[in-house]
Amino acid sequence: MTDLEFDRTHVWHPYASLRDPPPVRLARSASGVEIELSDGRRLIDAVSSWWCVAHGHNHPSIVEAIRRQSERMCHVMFGGFTHGPAVELAERLIAFAPPGLDRVFFADSGSISVEVAAKMAVQYQRAKGRPQRAKLAALKGGYHGDTSLAMALSDPDGMHVLFRDIMTRHFFAEKPSVPFGGEWDAADFASMLRTVEAHGDEIAAVICEPIFQAANAMNFYHPQYLRELRRLCDEKGILLIFDEIAAGFHRTGPRWAQEHAGVRPDIMTVGKALTGGHMTLAATLASGEVADTISGGTPSAFMHGPTYMANPLACAAAIASLDLFAAADYAESVRKIEARFKSALAPLVQRPNVADVRVLGAVAVVETKRLPARADIERVIDEHGVWLRPFCDYVYAMPPLVSGMATIDRIAAAIADLAACPPGPPQDGDFHE
Ligand code: PLP
């Protein structure tokens, strides 16, 4: 049995069936913007392996940092111990984060960092003497992860609908509809206002992906929404959580997507590009006020503690990744990527199967009326040597931030080819990222 045959019958892939699963490719190595397959073919990774490979695959300085750390200590429990990589990373991350978010909880994935953020908000309100504030408000069209609390905060009509009965019900406002760059209309905030007016006494925090709703909607919305939200949360004593896991680390241009609006949250989650896509690591950052209030409550301990919390190898990778973020002018690189995608992709809106084209930072989205057939998608990937992973109706690219213009042109050509294909039949299951 070949590796691919064994994989096909025994190994689940994300959002895939084990009966007649969609094809997977056998990856052998990866470097820079490319993934090499077992037969020697190379594919440009136009989705940065689910948006985390910011500096390119197997970046030598990150690989070296992991290697050096592995010789000293691969892991030690974080209960009762600390270590150099965790302390240095916390210092570095605080300096890199928006001012005021200077307390750090390390988590092992983005979803877990969201669970941690939500639990912090609930413990905060309890410590404030408001235990009835034990729910959150979130946005339709949002996505915060696949663990149960993160699912319960994601679009209630989206990909997790199957699990509705095992999820706690939270409160949802309509998806923001005034686009980034459009003219602000106060009516866009009305649903959030109504939600908070009606249920404010039960709401510990509002959580959202600032500016860019990624995995559920590929929606870029108006910065004024976040300013209104900050004002509303302050007025009602509700915490504001920004999930920067997808949008942070320059994906939309500035270091943090919230910078488009000039507002800061009380709690923020980061992940994905934190290690440059080399190890799994995320973090929840909180303000001193949040941390001090939790610590003044009963219990004073914050009740979360993953086994692999602050894994030293992952921390070493993240420190090396932050070095690269500090050394490069990614805001400028992303401006170039954005301009190139805009000029190459804007004309596609004329195509019969294209509903919309939108680009923000290093995110390019071609919304189709319906995705082309799987065979067309596979052909385009193989012919162009560009790895794309369309979902729902979206053909999109979120390439490594180090991508040069020749890479962007090849990605744009592949997307254009796909946008010219006719709509395919409805797809089963494969509707995430
Ligand atoms: N939050 C956002 C905004 C995301 O885009 C994702 C993943 O796509 C997550 C949370 C979950 O992160 P992870 O897949 O690392 O659990």
Image: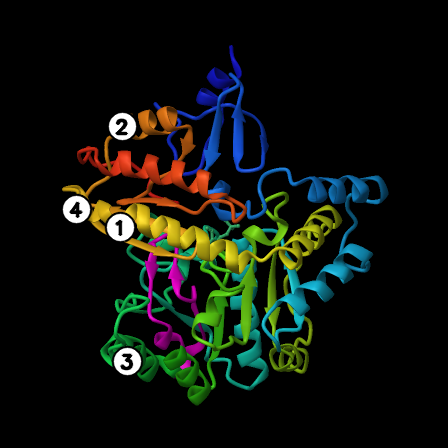
Q: Gap between marks 3 and 2, in whole Å?
A: 44 Å
x and y percent of residue 369 in the render?
18, 45
x and y percent of residue 402 in the render?
54, 46
x and y percent of residue 46 in the render?
44, 40
* The magenta segment: 201-226
Residue type at the position of mark 1: Ala
- Residue that carries the numbered disc 4 in the rendered image: 350
Q: Is mark 1 within 8 Å of ligand 1?
A: no
Residue type at the position of mark 2: Asp
- Residue that carries the numbered disc 2 in the rendered image: 376
Residue type at the position of mark 3: Arg
Q: Are marks 3 and 1 in contact (CB under 8 Å)?
A: no
- Residue that carries the numbered disc 1 in the rendered image: 346
Foreground tag (4 vs 3): 4
Near-viewer residue (61 or 378):
61
Mark 2 vs mark 1: which is more N-terminal? 1
Q: Gap between marks 3 and 1, in whole Å?
A: 36 Å
Depicted 310 relative to depicted 226: above or below: above
- Residue that carries the numbered disc 3 in the rendered image: 194
Mark 1 crowdedness (10 Å alpha carbons): few <14, some 14-19, many ≥20:
some
Depicted 406 relative to depicted 87: above or below: above
x and y percent of residue 19 in the render?
36, 24
- Local SS, label 3: helix
Q: Gap between marks 4 and 1, in whole Å?
A: 9 Å
**Is residue 296 rendered magenta in the image?**
no
Q: Gap between marks 2 and 1, in whole Å?
A: 21 Å
The number of discs equals 4
Evaluate whether residue 21 shows in this view.
no
Mark 4 crowdedness (10 Å alpha carbons): few <14, some 14-19, many ≥20:
few
